[in-house]
Amino acid sequence: MITQMLRVAAITPLSSYVTRFRFEHPEGAALPVFSGGAHVVVEMPDGAVLRRNSYSLISDPVDSSGYEIAVRREDAGRGGSRYMHSRLRLGDLLRVTVPVNLFSLDLRAKRHLMIAGGIGITPFLAQLKQIARLHAPFELHYAVRSRDEAAALPLLPDLPQVHLHVSDEGNRMDLGAVLAGQPLGTHVYTCGPEGLIDAVAETAARLGWPKGALHSEAFLSPPPGAPFDVTLARSGRKITVGPHQSLLEALEAAGVQPDWSCRGGACGRCETAVIRCDGHIEHHDHWLNDAEKASQTRIMPCVSRFSGADLALDL
Amino acid sequence: MPRTEFTPSIPSRPVYSGLSSHGSSSALMLAEGEGAEAILDLAAQDAAVMDRAHLIFIPAGTGHGPALRALGAKSYVEVPGFATALDRYRKALADAHMGTRLYVAGSEGMIGQAVAEALAAGLPADAIETEHRGGIARRMQCVHCKGITEGVTTDPFLCAHCGLTLFVRDHYSRRLGAFQGVCVDAETPGDVPAVQEIKP
């Protein structure tokens, strides 16, 4: 991945849990522009561990003066968001990848229907700016549990197409009503918890929507699990993956550099061939299909784990 | 007349994989000539597919009208040709919502135009089912003068607009719903290969 060293130019709390970070080039050089829905991977040197998390860009895609992300602090998470919230200071230098977009607008759409759950609002903040330039019809539904969770509310345009659904205030989002009666050419974009993405897919299927009009993005953080050993078939080396480490991180710590991009089970870049598998691969990704997962011949090292006697990879 | 099986060709050439039911979703149906039998087969496979269907039929000299009318679609109308169906069809597309399925059966020229209209109206390609029935005449665009010649059954053929002798290609325009015809004797004028009948 191509990275650039950027300076933390602003830190702005948006709510009790969510903080906005702005990165700029240390010498003020222009950054590559991007498209709405793009993300960057931020590298965080946290002691002996190099953490890498993907964050959607929320700033204007054509504004090359800086990149902005919004990070929700996950106290029970692996430590990336805690690092961002508690360790990062104005003026710090961080290594950030160039933007990659796995969740772009389908520009053939006649209308864009965006559904955000909680912190899943982030890619839409950049997409809204792109849509405003395109003058394309749109509708945004922002579902949160409580008003305090609606951190992005002040960043949203004050327009009738923007709908806030606060479930503890009694106006929970009704997906059936949102998806029914949409004109031809509407594309749906969902970002948020997996339950929301599944619910949109199920409701849309019930209403007869074809799959090609549905788009979603969810970055998974690598789930913890029991430690396991992996054999690297090309060198015969054996490495151990720790309980809070991902297979990809264990490979990197051992000096192996597999290709990667999103580090969240979505993009497919780190897909690796399995040479031997005596046991069970715990597939957590959104990339491999059910048949590929069942065959146990491919693994996504960024999020997937293994339990059993022997796993050998083509590395 | 059964479903036409075309010889596999370049990816550009459309494939009509046959109608299969999406249940009682709201549906638009367009049938022409022998394409009526594809709709009859579809309804026999799953009668619920007619529950919320609007069916437009172009008889093209066939007598399938009464059988189609008897399927009990939400609306049924017969029109003499695609051009006369167009206003009604466009209105139906403009009023349609996501979740509407389109079923088209008949000749290649009709399917091509119907699908092009639907895509332009925003209907996703994966909401469209097509089945080819009947003759295999092609709707051809002359790449030189851009004129469309309907009902082409031979290769080469004469462009109905500019008169060039055109070679029938499998290269297809989804936007126009037409195959591309290219001058066959551009290098050596008059050196025209023997005329053959188009095969499926």
Image (cartoon, grey):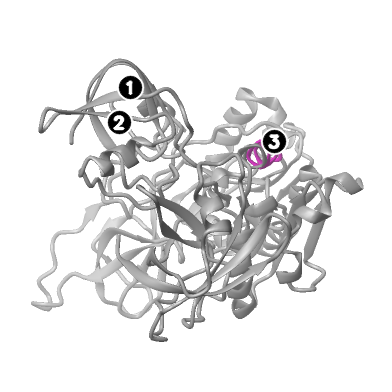
Nearer the observer: mark 1 or 2; the answer is 2
How many other residues sit within 10 Å of disc 3, few (<14), some (14-19) or many (≥20)?
few
| Tag 1: amino acid | Ser
- Whether residue A200 is in magenta: the answer is yes
Taking the image as drawn, is residue B52 in sight? yes
Between A190 and A100, the residue placed more toward the observer is A100
Nearer the observer: mark 3 or 2; the answer is 2
From the top left corner, tell me how far across and down residue A91 is, in percent.
48, 75
Labels 1 and 2 share a subunit: yes
Q: Chain of mark 2?
A: A
Mark 1 vs 3: CB contact within 8 A: no
Q: Chain of mark 1?
A: A
Q: Secondary structure at mark 3?
A: helix
| Residue that carries the numbered disc 1 in the rendered image | A295
| Residue that carries the numbered disc 3 in the rendered image | A206
Q: Residue at x 24, y 32 (%)?
A: A273
| Residue that carries the numbered disc 2 in the rendered image | A298
| Tag 2: amino acid | Arg
Mark 1 vs 2: CB contact within 8 A: yes
